[in-house]
Image: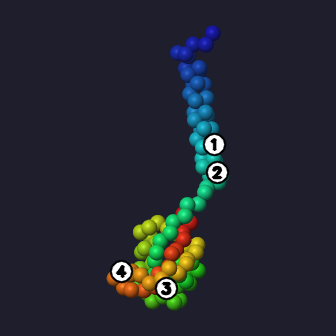
Amino acid sequence: MIHLTDPVTLGCILIMVAAFVYIVLTVRKIWRITRPSVPQIAQYELPIYWASYLVNRDHSGLDFGDKIEADVWLRDHHLPFAADVEETGIGRWNGKVCDMGLYTFLT
């Protein structure tokens, strides 16, 4: 007969519960890592002169201030580099009139 007050029985029960919890947490972690994720699309209208930097990561056409401005914008919006850009026409960016582009980001 099993007595729940027996220290050996309680120890075995605790070990089984701990093993069960460990297995459940491990399976959840593996599932989270291996499940396919569907990318979300975000689009923003930004200056077209950022295109080479935001799409190709080539900042050679930007002056230092424009590169910093683009980096700050990416950081503030928690976005990676852009996947695509389409020119949309003339618009305003920070009070300046410039050509704008519709940038597509995969998040």
**Residue drawn at point x = 44 percent, y = 70 percent:** 75
Answer with mark 2 or mark 1, whichever residue precedes in sequence.
Answer: 1
Contact between labelled residues 1 and 2, with CB atoms less than 8 Å apart = no
Q: Position of residue 100 (x, y in %)?
A: 47, 81
Say if residue 96 shows up in the picture: yes
Mark drawn on residue 94: 4
Badge 4: few (under 14), some or many (20 or more) residues near its Cα, within 10 Å? few
Residue 2 image offset from top left, x and y in percent: 61, 13
First-in-chain label (2 vs 4): 2
Classify residue 63 by image quadrant.
Answer: bottom left
Say which of marks 2 and 4 sits in front. Answer: 4
Disc assigned to residue 27: 1
Which three-letter amino acid code belongs to the residue tagged 1? Val
Give 69 or 49, whichever is nearer the viewer: 49
Q: Residues within 10 Å of mark 2 (few under 14, many from 20)?
A: few
Residue tagged by mark 2?
35
Report if residue 67 is visible in the image: no
Q: Residue furthest left?
A: 95
